[in-house]
Image (cartoon, rainbow, N blue to C red):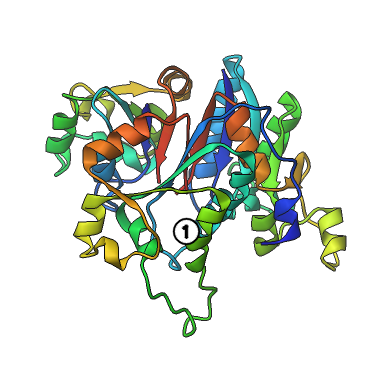
Amino acid sequence: MTDEMMDDEEGGGGEVKTFLYVNRKAPYGTIYALESLEVVLIGAAFEQDVSMLFVDDGVYQIKKGQDTTGVEMKNFSPTYRALEMYDVEKLYVDRESLEARGLTEDDLIVPVEILDTEQVQDLMESQDVVLSF
Amino acid sequence: MKFSIQVNEGPYTHQASDTAYQFTKAALEKGHEIFRVFFYHDGVNNGTRLTTPPQDDRNIVQRWSQLGEQYDLDLVVCVAAAQRRGIADADEAKRNGKDTDNIAPGFRISGLGQLIEAGIQAERLMVFGD
Amino acid sequence: MLHTVNKTPFERNTLDTCLRLAKEGSVLLLIEDGVYGAMQGTSAEGKMKQALHDHAIYVLGPDLKARGLDEGKIIDGIQVIDYGGFVDLAAGNGAVQAWL
């Protein structure tokens, strides 16, 4: 995290909106996972009602055991564990995406709430702002 | 209605910047307000003045600069993403020891907080990406 | 909610995921390469027709034309709009979710 990322004034005039960050891409193959996480961390300072949703390949972002030494890229998976410190605690995973990839909750690096399709539908429908990456 | 626009991809490689531009233009022509256009990920590459696209095709960077001027838009390039990809204004260039800057007219560089603020202040956030 | 899909149903699973996770009554708009999903005669036609039971579905005309797709051959029930129509949909349906 650079100084530049922290140099914005906080707050949004007292208004609280529901923000949903939709993560659908695997880590490392593209930058979207890392840069969307950076938005979440900066966004935490604005004290909005934040949820993160992991769907499709997004579930791979929070898989345990990432070791990037061989590819010489930064391993940013520990950052998901820091989300709690930023008061970002609503992490949701789409059950069908997890199961399609042969993963279970035990494979994940952070505690999450696993949602069925209908629950994901309702979660999305209830948001004021949806950020996709 | 007050819109904010997020552009996730650079010029030409993906249609995202084109669609974002057409949407933004249509919204303005209908009398809507654009609170901010925020360029993230490779979208920061929409903000370099060094492109020389073929003459017989649209000039994406210039088009944004012109729309920005016409409607006094706030075109913001994310500083963190810009640093990764080599888009800099004079201050950034100086601060990071670069021998030149390349930001296009009408764009400014600022932090990710501007994107969050754009989501809070507008009634709709539109995201254009790949 | 307005959902936008910008890739063909053959390249990515974006359309499939969107159709699964878009709540009944929400609106769908196909843009950019997503417009191919609006055409009759593809392997995606069945699921699009099914989706029409639960969603109003629109397709962006300029993107159809750019790709040489005949408006007369889009799936019955899908409506063609322009960028102005896109703005209207975005203004009139609550939050917008871009499926990327």
| Residue A95 or residue C18, whichever sits in front | A95
Location of residue A126 in the rendering, given as x and y in whole percent from the top left corner: 38, 29
Residue sitting at x 17%, y 34%? C40
| Residue A65 or residue A22, whichever sits in front | A65
Task: Write down the quadrant of residue B25 in the picture.
Answer: top right
Q: Is residue B114 above or below residue A127?
A: below
Residue sitting at x 18%, y 23%? C76
Location of residue B89 in the rendering, given as x and y in whole percent from the top left corner: 81, 53
Chain containing the residue with disc 1: A
Location of residue A87 in the rendering, given as x and y in whole percent from the top left corner: 54, 48
Q: Which residue is mark 1?
A: A33
Task: Write down the quadrant of residue B39 in the picture.
Answer: top right
Residue sitting at x 29%, y 39%? A120
Question: Going by the picture, which residue comes out furthest to the bottom?
Answer: A70
Location of residue A24 in the rendering, given as x and y in whole percent from the top left corner: 37, 52
Residue A62 appears in view: yes
Question: Mark 1: few, some, or many residues within 10 Å (few <14, many ≥20)?
Answer: many
Horizontal placement of C91 versus C56: left or right?
Answer: right
Residue sitting at x 35%, y 30%? A125
Question: Going by the picture, which residue comes out furthest to the top?
Answer: B31
Residue B59 appears in view: no
Image quarter in which the N terminus of chain B is found? top right
- Disc 1 residue type? Ala
| Residue A73 or residue B69, whichever sits in front | A73
| Residue B100 or residue B117, whichever sits in front | B117
Q: Is residue C1 above or below residue A133?
A: above
Numbered marks: total: 1
Task: Write down the quadrant of residue B117 in the picture.
Answer: top right
- The secondary structure type at the circle numbered 1 is helix
